[in-house]
Image (cartoon, helix red, strand yellow):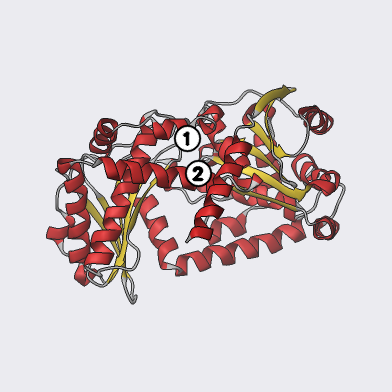
Amino acid sequence: MKKLSIYITITLMYCTSTLAQQATEFNVNGLRVIFKQSPKQVVSAIMYFKGGTGNYDSSQQGIEDLTLSATAECGTEKYNKNAFKDLADKYGVSVYGYSSYDYGAISLSCVKPYLDEGWDLFTQAITNPIFNATELALLQQKKAAEIQNQSADPDSKLSKMTMQTSFKGTRYAYEPQGTVAGITSFKPEQLKNYYQKIYNADRMLLVIVGNFSEEKIKELVQNSFAKLPHSSINSLPSPTDLKIADPNTIDTVSRKLATNYIQGVLGAPSAASKDMIAYRIAVNTFSNKLFEEVRTKRNLSYAPYAYVSTGFIPYTIMYVTTTKPKEAVTVMTDELNKLRNNGFTEQQLHDSKAGLTTSFFMRNESTGSVASAYGIAALRGDWHSQERLVDDINSVTLSQLQKVFNEYTAGGIQWNYLGNVSLVDAEAFNIPVK
């Protein structure tokens, strides 16, 4: 234990000194760039494309994820697929694209001595992808297999079910990775046209973390991205609050499983709101109570928990897998109501602050995590929030904790259930939040 304590102390001291180096922002021909120095020898860069599922309608689900994946997997004007992969393997470079609900991205990871090689692959993927038909067909087969595997996995199935029922009628009901039928139907010309739409300095953001001078980074960016196109864009999605209206609802899917998978959806403040830090601390305490009451005391589940999704449309999840859904759901809702009515303690506030702070420092041990954190914070409106996060955590009071928890957990619970539907007890799933 003593060695572990020393290790944690040294790690936190190291991370604190690293985070103390503030990031800087500059602009190259309309491209917004955030750069943060790091003492580490691993370089991370992420080119973000704003909008995510807000860039297309339901008929094009998955097109952005496929398009951005293809930029690094289907070859470029300078390198065909095999040459691209050979160089990446030779120099230990990772370049890949993906998309989510709120944004898409192409990322780079490489060691400092091979930045030139890594940067060349990264910029070629961004500026000169070719969407080769043969390679695209192979990528589509790979993506289709991944989607099928996710559908077979109960947790993945439950998550998709939750998004489609709780966010019906919004872009969060879309599937960013698409469906098998949709993904396999896209043609190279469609991807090329879609990429031309989002390849626009006004909807792009570049974040770089590495052991270099700002002058070096400015030179790289200027040489690679000074000629990005500009075009007018429609309004993009922005962060918002979510509050669930009464009464409780439940959506069920019958599946023969060894246990039953359950998620309850509650509201949450906007990730850009000052309430979010206090709310995350409150939900962390709530999650600890679920573990204590559902698993430790009653042995109703192996890993019950709660968490906050801090996307542009935020939400809170309370999750459990159990063979006794009536008992587990009853305890979970009771614990929610106890915290709402009996309040939090100073000890709970202290412990959750410590947990959130430690988690923050541990996540920031890698340059990739740092780049991601700054980029997502910038997309939400304020990357400086990353640099004051610890101070914001420490400043939360007990009264703030109680206020935001009661405000955003008010209303009904949107339950989603996968498993043996004969065990669904209407009374348990209708216990009100009060």
Of helix, strand and loop, which one carries label 2?
helix
Image coordinates for residue 255, horizontal then vertical, percent:
33, 72
Of helix, strand and loop, which one carries label 1?
helix
**Can residue 173 be seen at all in this image of the molecule?**
yes
How far apart are labels 2 and 1 at the CA level? Answer: 8 Å
Mark on residue 390?
1
Q: Residue at x 60, y 49 (%)?
A: 65
Q: Is residue 332 left or right of residue 179?
A: left
Q: Residue lying farthest front? A: 2
Image coordinates for residue 213, horizontal then vertical, percent:
78, 31
Q: Residue at x 17, y 59 (%)?
A: 330
Type of the residue with mark 2 = Phe
Q: Residues within 10 Å of mark 2 (few under 14, many from 20)?
A: some
**Can residue 416 be seen at all in this image of the molecule?**
no
Image coordinates for residue 174, horizontal then vertical, percent:
46, 48
Type of the residue with mark 1 = Val
Q: Residue at x 74, y 51 (%)?
A: 72
Looking at the picture, does residue 334 appear above or below residue 148? above
Judging by the rendered image, the residue that carries numbered circle 2 is 360
Q: Residues within 10 Å of mark 1 (few under 14, many from 20)?
A: some
Mark 2 in CB contact with mark 1 (< 8 angstroms): yes
* Residue 83 quadrant: bottom right
Image coordinates for residue 427, horizontal then vertical, percent:
12, 59
Q: Quadrant of the C terminus?
A: top left
Q: Nearer the viewer, residue 434 or 393?
A: 393
* Residue 398 quadrant: top left
Mark on residue 253?
none
Q: Residue at x 57, y 48 (%)?
A: 11
Q: Is residue 63 left or right of residue 293?
A: right
Q: Nearer the viewer, residue 17 or 373?
A: 17
